[in-house]
Image: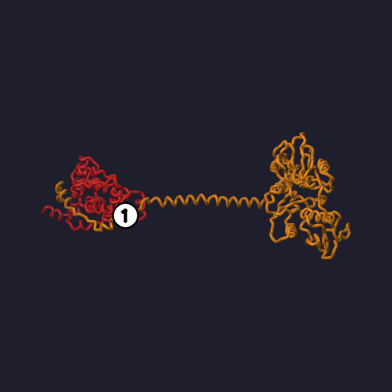
Chain colours: A orange, B red
Amino acid sequence: MKKSEWSDRELEELLRQMPSIHDHRNPHDIYQNISLKSRKTKPWLLPCLAAIAAVLLFFILVPKFMGGINYDQDSAAEKSSAGGNIAAKQDSLALKKENASTIETESPMTKQAELLKMKNVKTAIYKDEVGDGAVFTYWVPDTQAQILVPVSIIANQTRGQSWLTKYTDLMANLQEEEWGLSDFYPLNATLKLDKATKTLIVDVPSNHQYGQGSTTEANFINIIKNNMSSNSTTIKKIKFTTNGQPGIELGNFGKVEEKDVVPQNKHAYFFYFPEGSKLPFLTPSVETYKDINSAFEAMKTDQSMGLKSSLLSLPPLNNVSISNKIMYISFGVKPRLENNQQSIFCLEAILLTAKEYGVEKVIIKNPSLTNLGTFDLTKEIRVPIAPNLRNIP
Amino acid sequence: MSETFYINKSTNINERGGELMDSVFDELYQKYHHDVFQFLFYLVRNKEQAEDLVQEVYIRVFKAHHRFQGKSSEKTWLFSIARNVAIDYFRKQKGWKNRLLEKFDMSANQVKDEDPIPEEITVQNEEITWIYKCLEFCTVDQRSVIILRYLQDLSISETAKVLGWTESKVKTTQHRSLKVLKKHMEMSYEKEGLNSEKVRVER
């Protein structure tokens, strides 16, 4: 095959012969296309806006989701300690610990741990804790059925339901035994309210158990009286009926038809520690004291039936005076007022006792501490609404 | 080519009314559209692409009007813009996006491989078709020089202005591109046959 040679000139000649290629489009169309294209400026603008919007949306939504999760946790926490009071929870914890340590030998470490856990616990219900709920107080006998302990709960209010209905409904939920007291509720009786005569009608079945033994009888009557005086200011009388027939047959008292409700006051508050618990019930004495000073005096010493002194951990009380529903007190210098759990319980006992004498606020003069637990000692302290908050399922 | 067209530097395209843009476009179209299109077509070797790119050239011209200094002739200015547009186009084609798309789209890849040779060329004699095919083997720079020098009949200095090169660089590039063409013309000649040699010999 012969190898051909192309000279530069030949190639240039060929290239010059290349045909011209025409754009067959109408110039008007081209012009249209150009103006369309040139108007489409900033092609990145739209995706940019979309991205910014997405980021914004993300930041708006994420806290909501987080909040939702937090809310769940909160409500879970609330469920586990129903109402936000940790006292009872810790109490049951302490109980468990105690049970465990009765088998082993009790070590000082566990004791300390319990005390640490029970830091700054308030036992009573204060105004800011109630919220929309209703406070109900139930009187429960201790395990020996010797003393009556008031236990309070905070219940959600239900519309169109009288407080008595709610009160009796909730009796079934009380966990007396878990709290270290004896089982008493629900009552084997129906409670009715006669508004016209301000009378509570208690109807028991004919085979009721409340007539068996003198303490049971006394407790039954006293509990009903106390329940009414603690929860209602209107009820003045209690009428007992058996199966609709007037009167209740009680072994020692004989036939009881009615009792007057006397407002309970002028009692002193003591500590009652259920077996194995470090968390006391603040329990009023059976006796009444003519004035607050004698009540405080009594509180310095242990009483019979398991009631313990509720002022031991505090410095001596000086200059107690009440004027205009405000109680002024001051603490002695020795021993020093210490910010610990025992002192908190003691202060609560003072507040509850003061309430028995019609006091609404307590002012501590020249406190050596500014804060005792969550109490601000520099300000006036409101007395609790009810003692011994416990949770019910 | 010698006539120079100075565009009023004080007016910006964005501020112009449509009418003024209209008249500028008409003028440019009348004078240079064919040449610019021709240049772009031989550079990218695809009619549709060339059509798109020529529009891009107009857009850039309108945007850059105020930057036109009148130092060079308007034609060389337009060619240099067209060349930049083409280079951008090649660059875009090589971009990762297209490569990725090609990977996934085998059929498109195959179709794209062979740009169709337009009718205007196939109806010419075989050698024209050959040389058109051989132009593919030249680099974009080499092709630019060949188009400008032989198809557009620009002088060496004009070509240098369009490409922004020195004249000697134009000369060497021209020399090299002819060499490439020659080599490939001979190869295709060997492959494709005797009768064409006859034709050539007869001529």
Residue A68 seen from this side: yes
Q: Position of residue B25 (x, y in %)?
A: 26, 53
Q: Position of residue A232 (x, y in %)?
A: 77, 55
User: In this rendering, would A90 be left or right of B44?
Assistant: right
Which is nearer the eye, A273 or B182?
Answer: A273
Q: Position of residue A97 (x, y in %)?
A: 71, 45
Q: Chain of mark 1?
A: A
User: In this rendering, would B31 be left or right of A198?
Assistant: left
Number of labels in the image equals 1
- What is the residue that sits farthest to the bottom in this orientation? A244
| Element type at mark 1 | helix
Quarter of image, res A185: bottom right
User: In this rendering, would B81 be left or right of A52?
Assistant: left
- What is the residue that sits farthest to the left in this orientation? B202
Specify the amino acid type for callout 1: Ser
State the residue at coordinates (42%, 52%). A47
Q: Position of residue B8 (x, y in %)?
A: 26, 47
Query: What residue does disc 1 label?
Result: A35
Residue B182 seen from this side: no
Q: Residues within 10 Å of mark 1 (few under 14, many from 20)?
A: some
Quarter of image, res B172: top left
Above or below: residue A25 compared with residue A309: below
